[in-house]
Image (cartoon, grey):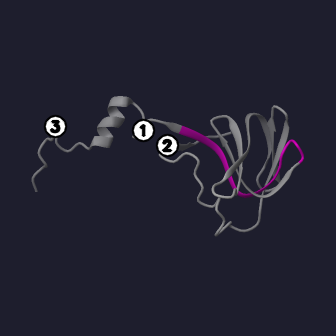
């Protein structure tokens, strides 16, 4: 089996995404989001006291993000810097933000058929799971 010829000065056996990664020193799309928590379906209590029965909660790049199903697309209900946290997903988590606490517990079920099930606010960006 012969190797493919070099195209536009690209060495044989190399792919364009691999070359871009090596040249730029980053992922193919150039950006990386660090996700410490992704909970869906979740029951959430916001610092204002509002309760959300089915939400998706992320802790990403140091921020707490809470999404609910909107009319046409998911709605961002809260975005605040994470100050601290305690608890776990089994018994419930408390995410400390600047103006109070966001309480998160995992809801029962898998959320099948819900618009937030496959929601990804970072389309085209690489995701890296990190510790909280």
> What's the distance in space between the residues labelled 2 and 3, CA to CA?
27 Å
- Mark 2 and mark 1 in contact? Answer it, CB < 8 Å: yes
Q: Residue at x 72, y 68 (%)?
A: 109
Q: Is residue 121 magenta?
A: no
Considering only order in the chain, which callout, 3 or 1, is on the residue closer to the N terminus? 3
Q: Residue at x 49, y 43 (%)?
A: 126
Q: Position of residue 94 (x, y in %)?
A: 82, 44
> What's the distance in space between the residues labelled 2 and 1, CA to CA?
8 Å
Mark 3: secondary structure: loop
Q: Is residue 1 left or right of residue 37?
A: left
Q: Would you place residue 41 above or below residue 60 in this image?
A: below
Q: Would you place residue 71 above or below residue 9 in this image?
A: below
Q: Which residue is mark 2?
A: 125
Identity of the residue furthest to the front in this view: 71
Considering only order in the chain, which callout, 1 or 2, is on the residue closer to the N terminus? 1
Q: Residue at x 65, y 59 (%)?
A: 116
- Point out the frontmost of discs 2 and 1: 2
> What's the distance in space between the residues labelled 1 and 3, CA to CA?
22 Å
Q: Is residue 81 left or right of residue 10?
A: right
Stretch of the chain drawn in magenta: 33-49
Q: Which residue is mark 1?
A: 27
Q: Would you place residue 124 above or below residue 23 in this image?
A: below
* The C terminus sits in image quarter: top right
């Amino acid at each position: 089996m012969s190797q493919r010829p070099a195209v536009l000065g690209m060495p044989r056996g190399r792919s364009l995404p691999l070359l871009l990664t090596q040249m730029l020193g980053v992922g193919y799309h150039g950006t990386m989001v660090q996700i410490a928590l992704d909970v869906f379906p979740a029951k959430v209590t916001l610092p204002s006291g509002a309760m959300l029965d089915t939400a998706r909660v992320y802790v990403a790049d140091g921020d707490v993000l809470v999404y609910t199903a909107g009319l046409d697309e998911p709605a961002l209900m809260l975005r605040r810097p994470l100050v601290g946290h305690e608890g776990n997903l089994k018994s419930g988590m408390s995410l400390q933000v600047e103006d109070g606490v966001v309480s998160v517990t995992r809801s029962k079920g898998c959320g099948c058929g819900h618009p937030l099930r496959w929601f990804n606010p970072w389309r085209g960006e690489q995701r890296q799971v990190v510790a909280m």
